[in-house]
Image (tube, helix red, strand yellow):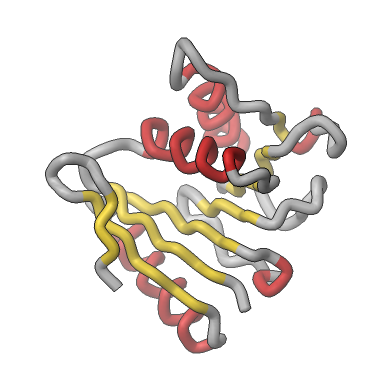
Amino acid sequence: MTEVRFYQLQRQSLDQVLPVLVSRTLERGWKAVIETTGPERLSAIDDALWTFSDDSFLPHAPASEADPAADPVVLIEGPGNPIGATVRFLVDGAPLPGDIASYELVVVVFDGNDEEALAGAREQWRAVKSSGHDATYWQQDADGRWDKKA
């Protein structure tokens, strides 16, 4: 059974939060795929992962440039898992993967200040729950820490 975590952004942007979540993934020795919905967003996320901190480095590559042996994080615009990752991040409204059961963890990150993104995340929540996967919902508190809400 796949664990699916929903992270509702309210006080920080995706560019601020995603690098931290990816760092924690790499600290655990996991590989990850980050799925977005278009080339412009893929490029922006690529830039954010390169520049989020002056004193750390997140090894990653877009799928078109990825080396499965060297890149533990790959950015994609649709289905696929070119590095055999066990973690999948879904951002910008990317859909749940058809092969969700092949992942240990799926992380849905959405903008809680955007009604369309919020509605999409609710639909995904219902789909995850009805398929029998474990789902948790996390929301940022006033200090930017994550509180488990469900």
User: In the rendered view, does 87 fall on the left or right side of 136?
Assistant: right
The furthest residue to the top: 54
User: Vertical placement of 55 versus 16: above or below?
Assistant: above
User: In the rendered view, does 51 fall on the left or right side of 122?
Assistant: right
Figure label count:
0
From the image, which quarter does the N terminus lie in?
bottom right
User: Vertical placement of 144 versus 146: above or below?
Assistant: above
Residue 106, given in percent of the width and then of the height, sits at 56, 61
Q: Residue at x 69, y 46 (%)?
A: 31
Q: Residue at x 51, y 41 (%)?
A: 24
Q: Quadrant of residue 112?
A: bottom left
User: In the rendered view, does 55 fall on the left or right side of 84?
Assistant: left
Residue 120, given in percent of the width and then of the height, sits at 40, 66
The furthest residue to the front: 28
Of residues 77 and 140, the one nearer the viewer is 140
Q: Quadrant of residue 59?
A: top right
Q: Residue at x 37, y 56 (%)?
A: 7
Residue 55, given in percent of the width and then of the height, sits at 48, 13
User: In the rendered view, does 87 fall on the left or right side of 127?
Assistant: right
Of residues 111 and 59, the one nearer the viewer is 59
Residue 95, given in percent of the width and then of the height, sits at 56, 63
User: Vertical placement of 123 versus 77: above or below?
Assistant: below
Q: Residue at x 49, y 49 (%)?
A: 91
From the image, which quarter does the C terminus lie in?
bottom left
Q: Quadrant of residue 5?
A: bottom left
Of residues 4 and 56, the one nearer the viewer is 56
